[in-house]
Amino acid sequence: MRPIHLLPAALAACALSSDEFAERYGAQTCDWLETCDGSTVERDDCLAEQADGVDALLALDGCSYDEEAARDCLDQREDATCDDPFGLPLDATACGLVVVCTPL
């Protein structure tokens, strides 16, 4: 009987794609806007705008997505309060490292 190697499959299942990051980041941002800023923007429009922003950054030449920073960013944003600008705590430094651009 051959052993089954599940670790690579398990790791792939845990991967955080840039699309999933954009969706989760967008949901956090839209939640903050609705709760803390009183935004009346339709939820679907808000989510689409957030996803478009991430997609636009990733489409730039010389830019890449850092999955580890994306995970850390989402975790750091979980502690956001209404006092944090746009739901981004000042110590949420990982969010600035999710899309890394190098000069061409």
Image (spheres, rainbow, N blue to C red):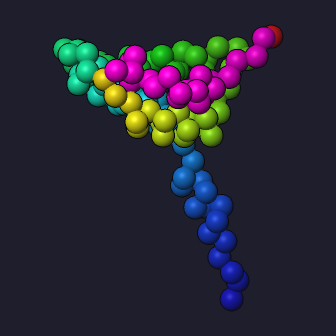
Residue that protrudes farthest toward the right in the picture:
104
Is residue 23 depicted above or below 96 in this figure? below
Residue 37 appears left or right of 101: left
| Quadrant of the snapshot with the C terminus | top right
Q: Is residue 44 visible?
A: no
Q: Quadrant of residue 26?
A: top left
Residue 77 appears left or right of 102: left
User: Residue 86 location, x and y as percent?
Assistant: 38, 18
Is residue 1 depicted above or below 95 in this figure? below
Residue that protrudes farthest toward the top in the picture:
104
Q: Nearer the viewer, residue 89 or 14?
A: 89
The magenta stretch spans residue 98:
yes
Tell me how many marks there are: 0
The residue drawn where x is 31% and y is 23% is 82
Q: Nearer the viewer, residue 15 or 68?
A: 68
| Quadrant of the snapshot with the N terminus | bottom right
User: Residue 37 location, x and y as percent?
Assistant: 25, 15
Q: Quadrant of residue 57?
A: top right
Is residue 20 depicted above or below 99 in this figure? below
The residue drawn where x is 38% and y is 30% is 80
The residue drawn where x is 62% and y is 40% is 68
The magenta stretch spans residue 82:
no
User: Residue 71 location, x and y as percent?
Assistant: 54, 40
Q: Which residues are magenta?
A: 83-103
The residue drawn where x is 76% and y is 16% is 102
User: Residue 88 location, x and y as percent?
Assistant: 44, 24
